[in-house]
Image (tube, grey):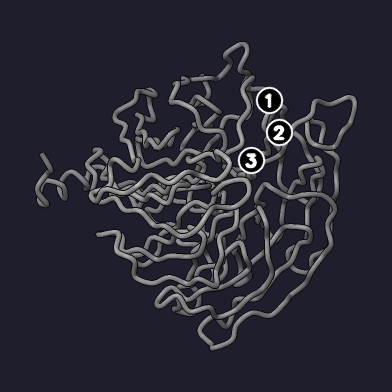
Amino acid sequence: MPLDFSLKKTLSRFLIAALCGAALGGSAAPFSGQISGWRGDGSGHFENATPPIDWDGESGKNILWKTKVGLSKFSSPALVQDRVLVVAEPARLICLDATRGKILWERTNGFADLPTPTEPKQLRNEQPNTTPTPISDGQLVYVVFGSGIIACYDLLGQRQWIQYLEAGPGLDFGRSSSPALSGGKLLVSIHHLFALDVKTGRVLWKNEKVLERYGTPLATKIAGVEILVTPSGQIVRLDDGALIFTATDLNFASPIVSDSAAYFIGTSASAVSLSKANAERVGKSLWKTDLDGSYYASPIYAGGLLYTASNEGNFSIINAADGKVVVTRELGIGSASGRPDLPNANIYSSLALAGPYLFLSNDIGDTLVLEPGKDYKELKHNHLGEGFSGAPVFAGGRMYLRTKERLYCIGQK
């Protein structure tokens, strides 16, 4: 039986978490507050974390728990106070106790769950349905599937609404863009950009010119104007969905925002000014630097520097002020470099900055812990034994990783 509104409100007060990513400085900090989803608040920053830097999957060193949650090759966990939310094929949302790893509830989100009978639609080439990461405002959790089904739950597992957006086939490798939240709107890329009312799921507006990419858009607020910086390089005003500027185009990685600028890493690195977002025309190219290789992992901004890694295993540090490459270093972990002395792997997992440490992983279970700065300083090389492609999340002294079939919690024993 659904909970009445007053009881839901009372319970929510105990469930609301202030799990915030770090504000990135300047006047263009991503919304943090209680929003928690892919890469935490989308920035990959976990400023108040005291993360583990040493673990081993084979010996179990600093592995606090691991729970089998089902198949999902590329998704990431979302952390909301004392709960971790993950998705699993074919269309499940799963909530776990973050302390013990116990599954608290799970819900299906298939065509049979829709309020109106709908003929099931096949994904292109049997693509995965569960790559997008759930997102929460601390009270409700929203989940998007490759099928176009979108649903909203409270943290007790009570479904608030579910609906289906039919908007054309996904990308060649499947839908992976995670949703964003801002100003009472759920921003979803299903073929193109939609804004949904968070309370009802009703479509408030759509912009068919802003096409989906593999990366995730980032909501921010500059000069009193709420905007969305998209992986396609398009900047959208959230009030009405109007396209106010087009910067560059990314295939895979997601943009990051700091100090009134948006940064994009793809075949090149570039920066665009956002200091006049309230004008009819915004955006000024600050710099552009050519890069070698393929970039699937989204970068990190910290202390005036950009940190990024190519799929071929080249790690670069870029000065965010002028785009000059400060350091380029070949990583000693498996990548697509083809080096005979290293295993073949992909660097899909986006970088994370937790406490004073930078985390960089490949998809066969290697994680490097680095010290941020203008020099390459490797502190630890860890082996999980299971690979992962999603982004890790951190809280306190714990790190959460979603592998192909399990959710791991890593912390100091």
The answer, for residue 399, to whether it is visible in the render is no
Nearest the viewer among 108 and 222 is: 108
Q: Are marks 1 and 2 in contact (CB under 8 Å)?
A: yes
- What is the quadrant of the N terminus in the image? top left
- Provide residue 74's location: percent of width, then percent of height: 57, 38
- Provide residue 20's location: percent of width, then percent of height: 44, 51
Residue carrying label 3:
349
Horizontal arrangement in the rendering, residue 372 relative to residue 180 (left or right): right
Residue drawn at 67 percent across, 52 percent down:
299
The image quarter containing residue 320 is bottom right
- Provide residue 408's location: percent of width, then percent of height: 50, 25
- Provide residue 14's location: percent of width, then percent of height: 23, 43
Vertical side of 54 occupied by 47: above or below: below
The Cα atoms of the two marked residues, 1 and 3, are separated by 15 Å
User: Which three-letter amino acid code belongs to the residue tagged 2?
Assistant: Leu
Nearest the viewer among 7 and 91 is: 91
Residue at disc 2, secondary structure: strand
User: Which three-letter amino acid code belongs to the residue tagged 1?
Assistant: Asn
* Labels in figure, total: 3
Residue carrying label 1:
382
Residue carrying label 2:
368
User: Looking at the image, is mark 3 or mark 2 earlier in the sequence?
Assistant: 3
The Cα atoms of the two marked residues, 1 and 2, are separated by 6 Å
Residue drawn at 34 percent across, 66 percent down:
203
Vertical side of 126 occupied by 29: above or below: below
- Pointer 2 local density, CA inside 10 Å: few below 14, some 14–19, many at least 20: many
Horizontal arrangement in the rendering, residue 231 relative to residue 287 (left or right): left
